[in-house]
Structure formats: C-alpha cells, structure tokens
C-alpha cells in the first residue's frame, strides 16, 4: 500500500495536480458533495433530482416492496419502460459491475442488490437550463457524469458507476417548420421543411408527429430508441438510407450544453467544428444535446420485398445460397433497395427438427410497379431455385406510404429477430443480422456532406451484426472468456474478409471491447475529432466508452490515465486518501 502511495505521489508531482484532477470524486472521497450541496442542486432543478437504486432493488430482501416488485417483474423486458427508468438501461450487463461483484438482476435480486454501474443520482431534466445546472454541478464537483436518453447503447455508454445521471427522457417537444433557417445563417438561406426534436423524443413519437403532416424522416426502426441522442450523433442508419442517406446526413442544427455550462448552437454557420463532430462522432462526447433539427420529406409509396430461403440445418448448400444473396445485394441496393435480413443458421422448429433460414425485407421507396421489382429479384431467385435442398419464398408488398411500412419494420422485423434470439439462445454463430442501410444516397452523400461519420459508411453494402450473452449467474471469469473469444477469435475472422483498411464498424452497434476503435469507428477522421474534443472538453467531463478521447481514461471513466497527447501516467486511485 505504501508503495502504491509513493508511486502515485511521484506521478502527481510530475503532473502537478491534486488527486482529484486524476480521478473523479467518489462517495468515499472528501470531495464528494455534501447532503446540503445535493439538496441545493435539487432546488435548482425544481426538485427533479432523485437518488437512484437499480430497478430490481424493490425485490431485494432489505428493500422489499411486493407491489412495486411485481411491476418490475412484469415490465422487466419492456424496452419502453426501461427507457423511462433512471435505475435501468436496456442491456442488463451494463447495469452490473462485475469487477466489483455488483449486480441487481431480477433472477438474483432476492439475494443481494448491488448498485453496479447504475448512477447514484439522476437529474430528470426538462429544459436546457436544467441540463446547464447539472453539467455545472458535475464540472464543479468533478463528478463522473452519465447521459441517459433511452439506455439502448450496446456499449454501455449511458451508464457509469458512482455517477450523476442526466436523464433526457422527459424532454419531448416536437415542432415542424416549413422553412428552416439555421441560426446565424444569412436571411436568404432556407433549408426547407424540417422538424425540431427535443433530446428525449423517441422514434415512434417522431414518426407519428411527421406522419400527421404527410411527411417522413430518415430515422431508425425501433420502438424505443431515441431520435436526438446517441442514434443520430453516432451516424444513424435507416431502412431508407439508400433513398436519402444517414440520419446525420439530414441533421441541420444541434443545440447543446458544452462542458463549461454554456448553451451553444452548432450548424453550417456557427461552431462548425462541433457540427461536423456531432454528425457521427458519437453520443456523450461533445456536450449534452438539448435539441436537434432534421429535414423532413414528403411521404412516398413503397414496395416492400420479402425473400426467404431455407434448408435443413446441417445442409452446407445453405451457405451457397447465402453467397448468392450477397452477390445479388449490390444490384438490389443500386436499384434503390435497403432494409434488413436475418440469418438463422440453426433455428430449431421443434425438438426434432432444425432449419437454416434467411429472412429478408428490403424497401423500394418511390416504386409502385410490382413487376419491376420482381424482375430485379429474378436472376437471384432462379439461381437459388437451382440449388438442391433450398426452398425459397417471396412476396412483394406494395404500400401507399413510408408510414405504412411501420408495421413491417417495427413489429415484424424486430419481433422476428427477438424470437430468433429467444429460440436459439446465444450459442456461437446463432444469428447474423444484415443491415442493407447504405448505398444509394449514403454513398452519394460522401461527396456532398463533410461530417465525422465513419468514411466506411460511404462504401458499405451491408452492415452485419451478431451478439453474445451470458446468464445472470455467470462468473466474471466466464464473462471474460466469452468477451475474449469474441474479440480475439471471432471478430478477427470477420475482419480478415477484406482487412481492417477496407472495413469498419458502426460505433453504435459494435463490440464494447473493440481494440482499435479509433480506426474502426472513424478511419482517418479520428485525429480531427480528438482535437475538437480537446478544444470543447479539455477536462474530459463527457467520456463515453470507446468514445473520442476515452483512451485517456480508465475502463470505468473514473481516472485519467493519460494527459492528452502527453506522457502516459498511471493514475492514483482509491488508495490515495487512505494513506495506510
Ligand atoms: C432495438 C434497437 C434498435 C436499433 N435500431 C437502430 C437503427 O435502426 N439504426 C441505428 O443507427 N441504430 C440503431 N440502434 C443502435 C442505436 O443507435 C444505439 O443503441 C444508440 O446508442 C441509441 O441512442 P439513445 O440515445 O437512444 O440511447 P442511450 O443509450 O441513452 O444513449 C447512447 C449514447 O448517447 C449519449 N446520449 C444520449 N442522449 C444524449 C444527448 N442528448 N446528448 C449527448 N449525448 C447523448 C449517451 O450518453 C450514450 O453515450 C438500435 C439499437 C437497438 C437496441
Ligand atoms: C428532491 O426534492 C424532492 C421534493 O422534495 C424529493 O422528493 C426528492 O427526494 C429530493 N431529491 C433528493 C436527492 O433528495
Ligand atoms: C459476490 O457476491 C456474492 C453475493 O454476495 C457472493 O456469494 C460471492 O462470493 C461474491 N463473489 C466474489 C468473487 O466476491
Ligand atoms: C432466489 O430466487 C431463485 C429463483 O427464483 C431461487 O432459485 C433461489 O433459491 C432464491 N434464493 C433465495 C436466497 O431466496
Ligand atoms: C444571400 O445573401 C448574401 C448577402 O447577404 C449574398 O452574398 C448571397 O449571394 C445570397 N444567396 C442567395 C442564394 O441568394
Ligand atoms: C394527407 O394526405 C391525405 C391523403 O392524401 C389527405 O386527405 C390529408 O388532407 C393530408 N393531410 C395533410 C395534413 O396534408
Ligand atoms: C464556454 O465556451 C464558449 C466557447 O468557447 C465561450 O463562448 C463561453 O463564453 C464559455 N462560457 C463560459 C461560462 O465560460
Ligand atoms: C420426436 O420424434 C420422436 C420419434 O419420431 C417422436 O416420438 C416424438 O414425438 C417427436 N417429438 C416432437 C416434439 O416432435
Ligand atoms: C412495370 O414494370 C414492367 C417491368 O419492368 C414493365 O414491363 C411495365 O410496363 C411496367 N408497368 C407500368 C404500369 O409501368
Ligand atoms: C418468410 O418467413 C417469415 C418468417 O417465417 C414469414 O412470416 C413470411 O411469411 C415468409 N415469407 C414468405 C413470402 O413466405
Ligand atoms: C400510419 O401508419 C399507421 C399504422 O402503421 C396507421 O395507423 C396510421 O393511420 C397511418 N397514418 C397515416 C397518416 O397514414
Ligand atoms: C471461440 O470461437 C471459435 C470461432 O467461432 C469457436 O469455434 C470456439 O468454439 C469458441 N470458443 C469458445 C470457448 O467459445
Ligand atoms: C475524413 O475522411 C474522409 C474519407 O476518408 C476524407 O476524405 C476526409 O478528408 C477526412 N476528413 C478529415 C477532416 O480528416
């Protein structure tokens, strides 16, 4: 212990800062805010500050509340409910803190309920000025800050241990305008019809609001992902990407609270570096976005095309069919098609029978002629029909509007996916989800739009996704084995297809342990992002896992391990004030 202290002391002299400059304040530290200070923050926020426990705490022996526990059990897998709860995110593993042996899963809450990575306090903000108050408080007291919108982040970026949470969920304003003039633009520059979205708006709310005006937007397909948070700031792909590009390609303006507590506007006319970074640089990194303005488009008719093929589960011909599908994708995409496909190499239909199956649904906007789309698929279908053992099914679904695709995309697609996850579990190689969300306008926008999105998007044909999970009782060692195999064995196999220089990963749907995330997520644009980050947030108030600048911090974002561009130092940590 003395040795640790000496080493830390030496480093602190070198760097010339107090321990609090290396590490955030923790509840055990003297710098942690007093009850009085928390209470003052609560006053400033109009009583919207709450102390937070994990949602399942009401089922634990010490905090048992039978009625509340029943609600938690009933809603445990409900993503809409989870999005509203300060004490929950969407992926339970990010609520736990395995390094500290803390979790509060519903399956084990009857034993102990550890706080895990759930924030200790939540500011349930309703306005930009509430956000300013919370940001200033975190900055003044050197707190770990977590911004939670819906908590959907696959990499656990919306939760952080021993943190103050800013919950944006309750900021729901939506306002359509016919003629959007960016703040600070010359009076004659109008961007046309657009919609302003407050930080907490979720995708179904956005779609419902624009459809009332017979308009549509480029956004994702989910019942509860947020429209203005990590989704669009990370790039934002859409089943209509080939038609109009990425969500972030259609962003016109952001309003945000930056680290010093100021409320600023970023668009093509002011704070252009932030505007560049916020379109693809990732959530939780440059400030708290209070509002985003995006383009709207007239709604148009669509033809949805569903193609399935199936073989018995052990039939190697399945992969021949899979290859033919991928060979046909570029031409389907070039003809305007984008959407999703789900590959289930081993789907048990009953105790005695399993199949390999691929289910695809591509959208062709501004199309009404079913024959035309059938003709596009004809070469592929005749190829598939020549492979012995392959059964194909196809169906063209003409729809009057993009709005009517909601039923197909938000219910059938994801529920199909969910039941697939459920039925086959998470064994190796179980489900591969293909996203045909680029090509077309996503590719073409590379010439027109200068933003921080991964340059790989402009060349992408398909974005493939698979996941791994563990049980509530898996030991940290078991979890590590799964993570290690995924990171060191399975992903390198996939990366070897074209090599790291020609491929990339989508920062919002990536491996939480991606080794060279700077390159995978942003390619050549990383160094510019890093310098914008240092300019706007020199102290690293906003740190998100595998986000820009996160390499300067430890895994939990609690202690700085590196001065930006400076020498590497080992941070002093909890042992510090103990001095024993
Ligand atoms: C069911 C499902 C469907 C999905 N569908 C799509 C899809 O169609 N297309 C697609 O591109 N992606 C999709 N995703 C991935 C999605 O983009 C990410 O999960 C994204 O992180 C969600 O952002 P959020 O704000 O809703 O979530 P959160 O987890 O709350 O936030 C994500 C990150 O953004 C930060 N953040 C949130 N709000 C703000 C804010 N106001 N200002 C600054 N930072 C903020 C958080 O701190 C965190 O770092 C999907 C994910 C799921 C689980
Ligand atoms: C904030 O004030 C409200 C209203 O008095 C109270 O219910 C809440 O518990 C307070 N929050 C904290 C963290 O004390
Ligand atoms: C983790 O906590 C559980 C429950 O308190 C306990 O049974 C177990 O021994 C702990 N494991 C470790 C590695 O500390
Ligand atoms: C907790 O619940 C699980 C599942 O319901 C059960 O198997 C286990 O025995 C319970 N443990 C305790 C300590 O009650
Ligand atoms: C807008 O006005 C500015 C001067 O205020 C002028 O330089 C510019 O050419 C005008 N642009 C258009 C599209 O009319
Ligand atoms: C939307 O379109 C429908 C059908 O064409 C029409 O009846 C309705 O008036 C339109 N609504 C608006 C707000 O334009
Ligand atoms: C915060 O930073 C911005 C941009 O550098 C600056 O304009 C503003 O004055 C700063 N605000 C405060 C309160 O220091
Ligand atoms: C599986 O096959 C066996 C033998 O043919 C049969 O007896 C059994 O009912 C089948 N089970 C199911 C679930 O189909
Ligand atoms: C529909 O497409 C087919 C095939 O391209 C074409 O022959 C036919 O003329 C088209 N029908 C209409 C009404 O345009
Ligand atoms: C494709 O498979 C899905 C899921 O099994 C099914 O709902 C759909 O009807 C199938 N499509 C066709 C054209 O048969
Ligand atoms: C949009 O689609 C939903 C069903 O997905 C439907 O209930 C609603 O009436 C549609 N709205 C318009 C304006 O077509
Ligand atoms: C690791 O991944 C490889 C490749 O997918 C697989 O063959 C192997 O079974 C995995 N090992 C473990 C322990 O999961
Ligand atoms: C961002 O990446 C693109 C594509 O590689 C490149 O053309 C552009 O110059 C880069 N921009 C910056 C600022 O590095």
Image: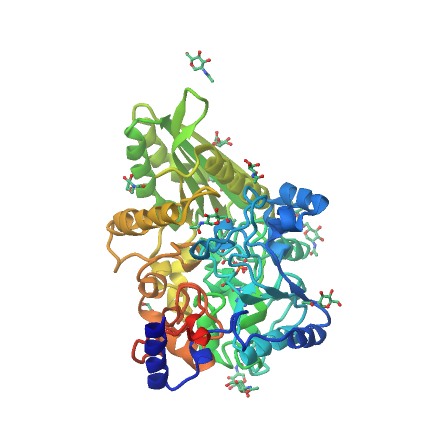
Residue at x-position 41% and y-position 30%:
347
In which quadrant is the C terminus drawn?
Answer: bottom left
Q: In this view, does 444 lie to the left or right of 159?
A: left
Q: Is residue 319 left or right of residue 348?
A: left
Residue at x-position 43% and y-position 79%:
19
The front one of 457 and 8 is: 8
Is residue 552 visible in this depiction of the protein? Answer: yes
The front one of 102 and 365 is: 102
Q: Is residue 532 left or right of residue 492?
A: right
Tell me the quarter of the picture where residue 38 sits: bottom right
The relative height of residue 349 versus residue 232 in the rendered view (above or below) is above
Tell me the quarter of the picture where residue 135 sits: bottom right
The coloring applied to the image is: rainbow
In which quadrant is the N terminus drawn?
Answer: bottom left
Q: In which quarter of the image is ligand 4?
A: top right
The front one of 551 and 430 is: 551
Q: Where residue 15 appears, x then y in whole percent?
A: 35, 84
Tell me the quarter of the picture where residue 548 sits: bottom left
Q: Where residue 579 appears, x then y in whole percent?
A: 42, 75
Is residue 370 visible in this depiction of the protein? Answer: no
Q: Where residue 173 appears, x then y in whole percent?
A: 68, 64
Residue at x-position 55% and y-position 71%:
288
């Amino acid at each position: 212990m003395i040795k640790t202290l000496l080493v830390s002391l030496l480093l602190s002299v070198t760097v010339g800062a107090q321990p609090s400059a290396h590490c955030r304040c923790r509840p055990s530290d003297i710098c942690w805010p007093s009850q009085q200070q928390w209470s003052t923050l609560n006053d400033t926020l109009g009583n919207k500050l709450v102390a937070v426990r994990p949602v399942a705490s009401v089922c634990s022996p010490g905090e048992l509340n039978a009625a509340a526990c029943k609600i938690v059990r009933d809603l445990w897998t409900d993503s809409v409910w989870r999005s509203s709860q300060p004490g929950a995110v969407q992926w339970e593993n990010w609520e736990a803190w395995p390094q500290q042996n803390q979790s509060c899963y519903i399956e084990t809450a009857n034993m102990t309920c550890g706080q895990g990575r759930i924030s200790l306090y939540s500011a349930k903000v309703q306005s930009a000025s509430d956000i300013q108050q919370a940001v200033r408080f975190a900055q003044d007291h050197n707190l770990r800050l977590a911004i939670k919108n819906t908590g959907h982040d696959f990499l656990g970026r919306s939760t952080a241990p021993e943190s103050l949470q800013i919950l944006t969920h309750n900021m729901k304003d939506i306002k359509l305008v016919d003629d959007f003039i960016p703040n600070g633009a010359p009076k004659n520059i109008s961007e046309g019809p657009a919609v302003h979205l407050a930080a907490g708006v979720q995708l179904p709310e956005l779609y419902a609001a624009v459809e009332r005006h017979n308009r549509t937007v480029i956004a994702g397909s989910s019942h509860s992902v947020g429209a203005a948070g990590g989704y669009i700031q990370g790039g934002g792909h859409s089943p209509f990407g080939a038609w109009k590009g990425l969500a972030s390609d259609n962003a016109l303006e952001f309003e945000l609270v930056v680290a010093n507590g100021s409320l600023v506007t970023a668009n093509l006319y002011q704070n252009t570096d932030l505007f560049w970074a916020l379109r693809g640089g990732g959530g939780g990194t440059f400030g708290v976005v209070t509002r985003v303005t995006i383009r709207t488009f007239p709604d148009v008719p669509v033809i949805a095309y569903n193609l399935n093929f199936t073989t018995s589960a052990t039939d190697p011909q399945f992969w021949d069919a899979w290859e033919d599908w991928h060979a046909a994708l570029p031409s389907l995409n070039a003809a305007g098609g984008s959407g999703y496909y789900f590959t289930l190499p081993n789907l048990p239909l009953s105790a005695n029978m399993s199949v390999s199956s691929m289910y695809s649904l591509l959208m062709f906007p501004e199309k009404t002629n079913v024959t035309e789309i059938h003709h596009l698929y004809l070469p592929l279908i005749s190829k598939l029909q020549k492979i012995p053992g392959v059964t194909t099914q196809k169906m063209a679904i003409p729809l009057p509007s993009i709005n009517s695709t909601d039923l197909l995309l938000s219910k059938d697609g994801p529920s199909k996916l969910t039941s697939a996850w459920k039925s086959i579990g998470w064994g190796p190689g179980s489900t591969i989800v293909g996203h045909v969300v680029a090509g077309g306008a996503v590719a073409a926008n590379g010439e027109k739009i200068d933003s921080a999105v991964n340059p790989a998007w402009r060349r992408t044909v398909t974005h493939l996704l698979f996941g791994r999970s563990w049980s509530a009782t898996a030991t940290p060692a078991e979890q590590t084995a799964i993570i290690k195999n995924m990171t060191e064995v399975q992903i390198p196999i996939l990366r070897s297809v074209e090599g790291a220089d020609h491929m990339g990963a989508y920062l919002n749907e990536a491996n939480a342990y991606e080794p060279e995330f700077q390159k995978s997520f942003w390619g050549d644009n990383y160094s510019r992002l890093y310098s914008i980050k240092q300019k706007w947030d020199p102290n690293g108030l906003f740190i998100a896992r595998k986000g820009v600048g996160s390499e300067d911090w430890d895994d939990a974002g609690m202690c700085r391990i590196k001065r930006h561009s400076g020498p590497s130092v080992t941070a002093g940590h909890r042992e510090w004030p103990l001095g024993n």
